[in-house]
Amino acid sequence: MHVISLKALVEFWTIHPDSKDSLARWHRIVERSTFSDYASLHQTFPSADVVGQYTVFNIGGNKYRLIASIHFDRGKVYVRHVLTHQEYDLGKWKK
């Protein structure tokens, strides 16, 4: 899968350095994988949930949330938001 974009991850882990290893690991796994559908993604990321049109990943032991739009047919993962759990709970990302 092609992740768009690594820049969003780097910007987040620059502010939250403790997220770097977890985000880099997530990126590495996704880039090296081919997911045909949500079921195949869920085998690798069992805590991933579909929320509306997005897939939400728990990062760093659920301390952070990565929200992505996944286009399985095109092999693309668009990072929409990387948030702390508290920011995620506010729900502003849904608008």
Image (cartoon, rainbow, N blue to C red):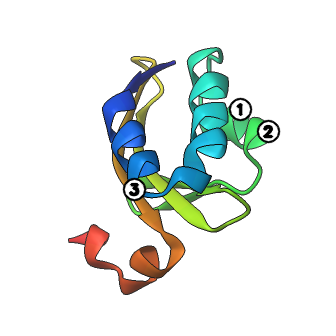
Q: Position of residue 38 (x, y in %)?
A: 61, 40
- For the residue carrying disc 2, how many other residues have a C-alpha within 10 Å: few (<14), some (14-19), or many (20+)? few
Dot label at residue 15: 3
Task: Determine whether label 2 and label 1 are within 8 Å by CB.
Answer: yes
Q: Label 3 is placed on what type of residue? A: Ile
Is residue 68 shown above or below 27? below
Residue 4 shown left or right of residue 24 in the figure: left
Which residue is denoted by mark 1 in the rendering?
40
Q: Residue at x 65, y 40 (%)?
A: 21
Which residue is denoted by mark 2 in the rendering?
43
Task: Determine whether label 1 and label 3 are within 8 Å by CB.
Answer: no
Q: Label 2 is placed on what type of residue? A: Gln
- Name the one closer to the observer, 72 or 4: 4
State how far apart marks 2 and 1 are (Cα): 5 Å
For label 3, the SS is helix
Can I make out residue 23 in this image? yes
Is residue 9 shown above or below 52? above
Q: Position of residue 27 (x, y in %)?
A: 56, 30
| Image quarter (top left, top right, bottom left or bottom right) of the C terminus | bottom left
- Name the one closer to the observer, 29 or 74: 29
- For the residue carrying disc 1, how many other residues have a C-alpha within 10 Å: few (<14), some (14-19), or many (20+)? few
Task: Determine whether label 3 and label 2 are within 8 Å by CB.
Answer: no
Q: Position of residue 89 (x, y in %)?
A: 45, 82
Dot label at residue 71: none
Q: Which of marks 2 and 3 precedes in the sequence?
A: 3
State how far apart marks 1 and 3 are (Cα): 32 Å
Residue 4 shown left or right of residue 66 in the figure: left
Residue 52 shown left or right of residue 39 in the figure: left
- Name the one closer to the observer, 71 or 28: 28
Can I make out residue 36 in this image? no
Is residue 31 shown above or below 22? above
Q: Residue at x 44, y 20 (%)?
A: 73
